């Protein structure tokens, strides 16, 4: 596979123990100890009130991470292409629909239905940003972050335009949670650009490899990496937080993994 290259102009991150990339970067760089706490999922202020009320946790964390990356880069969200990646989308709404279908009253709320589809976060993003740019939605189970990264890097390489990657998850309610447990919502966003600018933080070069995965040295953060599909991004985020050149290997579809060379700008 030919290397795909892009620059990172903005980063957004929410997870248990950090409500922003600024907070997370201090932890991932080793300047601050990690302490898990429940995630605060803020309502998406960029949405009109009617749409804002309809959003669940999954959309809230996706919108928050994407907005942070856009703001950090000083970009115009309406001009940026996007890739949204999630292993399972909105489990709360799917669960509520299944309950309705199993009841005597089988009417399904239209709000529940349009929030249950896999591209709901992408749709809300287009409403909030006014973007008419290309948008893709991908799913690859535990490899969803890796699949999203390859999709976004390919779009940057082929079309020569900025692309926002947003990968996000939220726990399922029971009984689905027993089969597919996740400890917390999580979302990461990377604004990728074909060319370096004054906003660029690092250049990435990506290729498929058959090599051992990069692990996190902190046991709690490593557990987080293994427990949430989009948290497979944590080794890359740690390299970016440390601001050093290096190489990390991320999950993809076995037996292949994704090697990412990080070069600070």
Image (cartoon, rainbow, N blue to C red):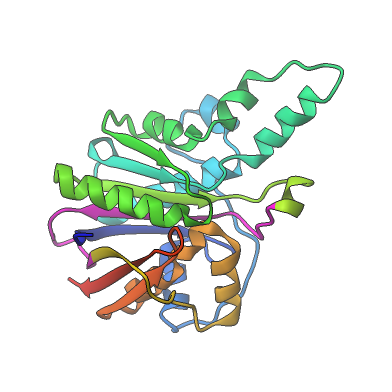
Q: Is residue 209 above or below residue 103?
A: below
- Is residue 143 visible in the rendered image? The answer is yes
Residue drawn at x 24%, y 49% as measured from the top left? 154
Of residues 166 and 48, the one nearer the viewer is 166
Taking the image as drawn, is residue 68 in sight? no
Instruction: Tell me: residue 207, above or below residue 135.
Output: below
Residue 136, percent across and down?
36, 37
The percent position of residue 148, horizontal first and vertical second, equals 38, 50
Q: Quadrant of the N terminus?
A: bottom left
- Residue nearer the viewer, 208 or 232: 208
Quadrant where the C terminus sits is bottom left
In the picture provided, is 220 more to the left or to the right than 212?
right
Residue 115 located within the stretch drawn in magenta: no
The stretch drawn in magenta includes residue 196: yes
The residues colored magenta run 180-204
- In the rendered image, residue 79, in percent from the top left (x then y), is placed at 22, 37
Residue 143: x percent and y percent? 47, 56
Q: Residue at x 43, y 60 (%)?
A: 252
Q: Quadrant of residue 201?
A: bottom left
Name the side, left or right, on which 6 lies relative to 258: left
Q: Is residue 3 above or below residue 30?
A: above
Left or right of 182 in this view: 24: left
Q: Residue furthest right?
A: 104
**256 relative position to 107: left or right:** left
Image quadrant where residue 105 sits? top right
Q: Which residue is depicted at the point 49% across and 40% down?
A: 44
Reply above or below: 69 against 32: above
Q: Residue at x 49, y 78 (%)?
A: 216
| Foreground residue among 124 and 194 | 194
């Amino acid at each position: 596979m030919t290397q795909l290259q892009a620059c990172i102009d903005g980063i957004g991150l929410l997870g248990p123990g950090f409500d922003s990339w600024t907070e997370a970067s201090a932890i991932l760089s080793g300047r601050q100890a990690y302490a898990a706490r429940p995630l605060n999922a803020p309502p998406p202020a960029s949405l009109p009130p009617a749409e804002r009320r309809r959003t669940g946790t999954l959309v809230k964390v996706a919108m928050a991470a994407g907005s942070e990356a856009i703001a950090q880069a000083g970009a115009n969200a309406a001009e940026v292409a996007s890739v949204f990646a999630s292993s399972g989308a909105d489990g709360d709404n799917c669960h509520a629909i299944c309950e309705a279908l199993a009841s005597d009253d089988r009417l399904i709320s239209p709000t529940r239905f349009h929030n249950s589809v896999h591209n709901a976060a992408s749709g809300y993003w287009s409403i909030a940003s006014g973007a008419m740019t290309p948008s893709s939605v991908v799913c690859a189970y535990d490899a969803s972050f890796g699949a999203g990264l390859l999709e976004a890097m390919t779009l940057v390489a082929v079309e020569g335009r900025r692309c926002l990657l947003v990968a996000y998850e939220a726990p399922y309610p029971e009984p689905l949670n027993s089969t597919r447990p996740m400890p917390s919502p999580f979302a990461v966003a990377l604004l990728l650009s074909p060319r370096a600018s004054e906003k660029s933080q690092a250049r990435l070069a990506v290729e498929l490899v058959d090599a051992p995965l990069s692990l996190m040295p902190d046991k709690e953060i490593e557990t987080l990496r293994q427990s949430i599909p989009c948290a497979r991004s944590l080794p890359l985020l740690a390299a970016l937080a440390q601001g050093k050149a290096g190489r990390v290997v991320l999950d993809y579809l076995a037996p292949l993994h994704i090697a990412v060379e990080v070069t600070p700008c």
